[in-house]
Image (cartoon, helix red, strand yellow):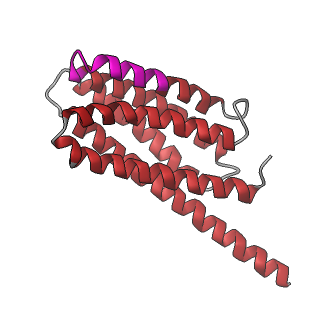
Amino acid sequence: MKTESQQAAWLRKYYLVRAAFSFAWVAAVFTLAKQSPALATVLLIAYPAWDALANLLDVRMSGGAKANLTQLINIWISALVTLAIAASLAMNLQIVLAIFGTWAIASGLLQLATAIRRRKDSGGQWVMMLSGAQSALAGGFFVAQQGGSAPVLQTVAGYAAVGAVYFLISGVVVWVREGRRGVKGLVAGKS
C-alpha cells in the first residue's frame, strides 16, 4: 500500500496530466478541428477513451479495483461511450451530444463518489466533488440541448475546458498540501 505522500504525489501528477490533456484537447478543437472534420471525429472519440484510460491508470496506482469500484465502473462506462460515439457519428451529430450528456451525468456522479471516498485521505477532493457535480449538471444540459442546433464539438469543448480547470486546481491544491506537509515535517524534525 502506498504511503500518504506517495498517494499525494500520484494524485498531483494524475490531476495535472488530466488538466494538460484536456487543455490540449480543447485547443485542438478550437484550432485544428475547424479545418478537419476527420480530426473532429477523432477528437470526439478520443475524449471518453482518454477518460477510460486515465481512470484505469488511477485504479492501478490507487489500490486496485476492489478499492476503487466507482472508477472501475467509470472505466467501463467511458469505454462503452467511446464505442457508442464512434457508431453514432455516422448517423446524427446531435445524438453524440445526448451520448456525451448521459456520460457526463454518470461519470460526474462517479467522480463525485470517488472524491467523497478520498476526501479524508487526500487533498484537493473538494474541487473534485465540485467537478463531479458540475459534470452531472452539464450532462443534463447536453441532453436537454440534444436535437437542437447546438454546435456539438464546441459544446463538449466548453465542458472539457471547465473540467481541465478543475483538474488543474486539484493538482495545485494537492501540491500545496504536499509542500505544507513537507515543511511541517522539517520543522518537527528540528524540534
Most foreground residue, 88 or 95? 88
Location of residue 28 in the rendering, given as x and y in whole percent from the top left corner: 28, 47
Location of residue 9 in the rendering, given as x and y in whole percent from the top left corner: 65, 58
Most foreground residue, 30 or 184? 30
Judged left or right of residue 66, residue 21 is left
As for residue 88 lying within the magenta part, the answer is yes
139 versus 9 height, above or below: above
The residue shown at (72%, 60%) is 5
Examine the rendering and report whether any part of residue 166 can be seen: no
The residue shown at (22%, 23%) is 93
Q: Spot the residue most to the bottom.
A: 190
Most foreground residue, 39 or 144? 39
156 versus 120 height, above or below: above
Residue 181 in which image quadrant? bottom right
State the quadrant of the C terminus. bottom right
Which residues are the magenta region? 79-94
Residue 134 in which image quadrant? top left
Residue 61 in which image quadrant? top right
Examine the rendering and report whether any part of residue 135 can be seen: yes
The residue shown at (67%, 34%) is 68
Judged left or right of residue 90, residue 174 is right
Most foreground residue, 25 or 100? 25
Judged left or right of residue 15, residue 160 is left
The residue shown at (42%, 49%) is 21
36 versus 170 height, above or below: above
Location of residue 157 in the rendering, given as x and y in whole percent from the top left corner: 29, 42
Location of residue 43 in the rendering, given as x and y in whole percent from the top left corner: 32, 36
2 versus 71 height, above or below: below
- How many badges with numbers are in the image? 0
